[in-house]
Structure formats: C-alpha cells, structure tokens
C-alpha cells in the first residue's frame, strides 16, 4: 500500500489544503495495460495527470493516477466519481480488474521546502499532492493558489462531458500523450491537434469590482470570453482567442478593466 505520511510530519509551516476528491484503487492482472488503453496519458511516472474521455473526445473525468506497487490509486473530483466508476466498470467487461473505493484523503501542499507527497505533474509551482489516511490541517486556499497560476481545475471550472481537453489546457499541462497509442476519444483529440488551431481556452483572469460565473468579457461591444468561476478578484474564464487577438481595445468585465493571463506555458496559445 502507498505510504501515508502522518499529519504531524508536515503541519507546522506548510500551505496545505484538503481537496474534495474520491480515490479508487485499481488492481488485478493486466491493470496497467488496461488502464493505459483508456486514458489520455501514459502511466510511466509515479504520478500522472490524465482523463477518461467520451468517444467524442470530451472529458468524463480528469484524474491523477498514483502508482501503488502493482496497483494504482486514481483520484478524481468527488462530483465526477460516480460517473467515472460507472464507466470504468463498463470498460472492464470480463477483465480481472478490481475497482474499490478507498477512505484515503488528498491534500495539496506548496510553498515550502522538503514537501511530502509527489510533485504535481501539471506545473511545479502547484506544489505536491499527498495521499494520506491521516487528516492534515487545512491551512490555505488551494482554489486561490491555482487561480494565481492560471491553472484550470475541473473541481471548480467545468462539468462532466462538456469540455474538450484543449479547452481546459490539458495538452499544455502534461495531461495528453499524443504518441502513446490508442485511448478513448483519441481520434477526435488528435484531429483537433493536427488540423485546427485551438480557438478557445480557459485562462486565468484578475479583475476589479464584482464578477461572477456567467458574466461576459468584452472588447468594446464584442464578447471575447465568459467567466466560469471566481474567487476574490481572481477567476477563470473561457476565452475566444481569435477574438482577443484581433481586438483593438483592452478587455473589460462589468465595465472595469480585466487582466487575462497568458497560457500556463507563458505563450499566447
């Protein structure tokens, strides 16, 4: 079983936050090949970021997959867990794969040296992810932390079966391996990468005044984006990149200027 650090080992100065995640343990003969054949990413590392897609290429649930000996621990937003469990059982068919829900907890920790857990594979600045059976002290606002970095998170930013991986920047966050071989929805995702320019992506925003999900970001009178989540003066929006690039005036949100962050790669993609 994965080693679970005691809470007392890392409470004192750590910025830590409990995450609303459900963890499944997947085990059985051939489990690695079976799981890798379903998900958007290979499972070569100790922790991988991946998603299970519909055949049409939309995200059913994104997840972190942790190696646990010959088994895997799969942590996903609790609000997606039931649908993910149903889909995994459907794909299992007669394969000797066991899927069990655990009582483990997931924490994010950041901004300290010698952090426990494993580095978040999406972006080093996000910190580490810790799986433990011992509750830790919740000391910080993870939502604010990831928004400050402009990183989308399905717990807050989108629903199941509504979003393509590129919309949520999974291709920029080490969540899609285009050379790994087949996975569910691969044809659509690969075609979007090869044949089109991504027209919309989630981008972090910093704004003045009040804003809420559903508010529109304008350049003049033209809509260039829609707010999907806010926390204080930060948020996440889905941005029409073509419209933003061609705009001749600065973007506004509810009549005030709004800063639209660059992509997590630091590029305008």
Image (spheres, helix red, strand yellow):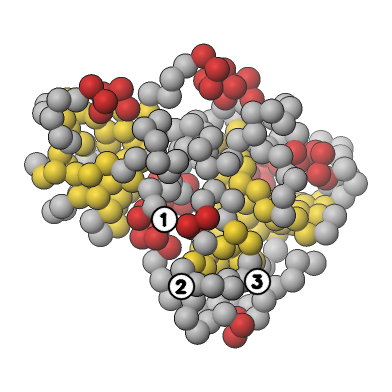
* Residue 232: mark: none
* Residue 146: mark: 1
The Cα–Cα distance between marks 3 and 1, rounded to whole angstroms, is: 21 Å
126 to 243, vertically: above or below: below
Q: Residue at position x 56%, y 59% from top?
A: 21
The residue where tag 3 is placed is: 132
The local secondary structure at tag 1 comes to helix
The residue where tag 2 is placed is: 15
Q: Nearer the viewer, residue 91 or 62?
A: 62
**In the displayed image of the protein, which residue is found farthest to the top?**
195
Residue 81 in picture, x, y percent from top left: 59, 50
Q: Residue at position x 34%, y 36% from top?
A: 238
The local secondary structure at tag 3 comes to strand
Residue 55 in picture, x, y percent from top left: 62, 25
- How many numbered callouts? 3
Q: Nearer the viewer, residue 269 or 28?
A: 269
Q: Quadrant of residue 51?
A: top right
The Cα–Cα distance between marks 2 and 3, rounded to whole angstroms, is: 16 Å
Q: Are marks 2 and 3 in contact (CB under 8 Å)?
A: no
243 to 147, vertically: above or below: above
Q: Residue at position x 47%, y 37% from top?
A: 169
Q: Residues within 10 Å of mark 2 (few under 14, many from 20)?
A: many
């Amino acid at each position: 079983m994965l080693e679970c650090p005691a809470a007392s080992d890392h409470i004192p100065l750590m910025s830590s936050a409990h995450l609303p995640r459900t963890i499944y343990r997947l085990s059985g003969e051939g489990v690695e090949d079976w799981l890798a054949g379903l998900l958007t990413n290979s499972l070569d590392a100790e922790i991988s970021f991946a998603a299970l897609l519909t055949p049409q290429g939309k995200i059913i649930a994104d997840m972190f997959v942790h190696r646990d000996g010959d088994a895997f621990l799969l942590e996903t937003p609790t609000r997606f867990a039931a649908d993910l469990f149903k889909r995994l059982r459907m794909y299992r068919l007669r394969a000797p794969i066991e899927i069990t829900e655990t009582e483990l907890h997931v924490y994010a920790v950041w901004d300290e040296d010698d952090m426990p857990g494993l580095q978040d594979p999406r972006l080093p600045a996000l910190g580490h992810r810790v799986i433990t059976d011992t509750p830790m002290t919740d000391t910080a606002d993870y939502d604010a932390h990831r928004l400050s970095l402009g990183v989308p998170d399905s717990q807050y930013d989108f629903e199941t079966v509504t979003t393509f991986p590129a919309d949520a920047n999974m291709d920029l966050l080490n969540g899609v391996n285009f050379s790994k071989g087949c996975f569910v929805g691969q044809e659509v995702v690969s075609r979007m990468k090869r044949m089109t320019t991504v027209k919309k992506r989630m981008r972090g925003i910093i704004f003045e005044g009040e804003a809420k999900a559903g508010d529109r970001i304008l350049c003049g009178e033209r809509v260039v984006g829609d707010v999907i989540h806010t926390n204080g003066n930060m948020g996440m929006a889905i941005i029409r990149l073509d419209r933003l690039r061609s705009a001749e005036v600065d973007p506004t949100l509810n009549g005030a200027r709004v800063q639209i962050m660059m992509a997590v790669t630091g590029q305008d993609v």
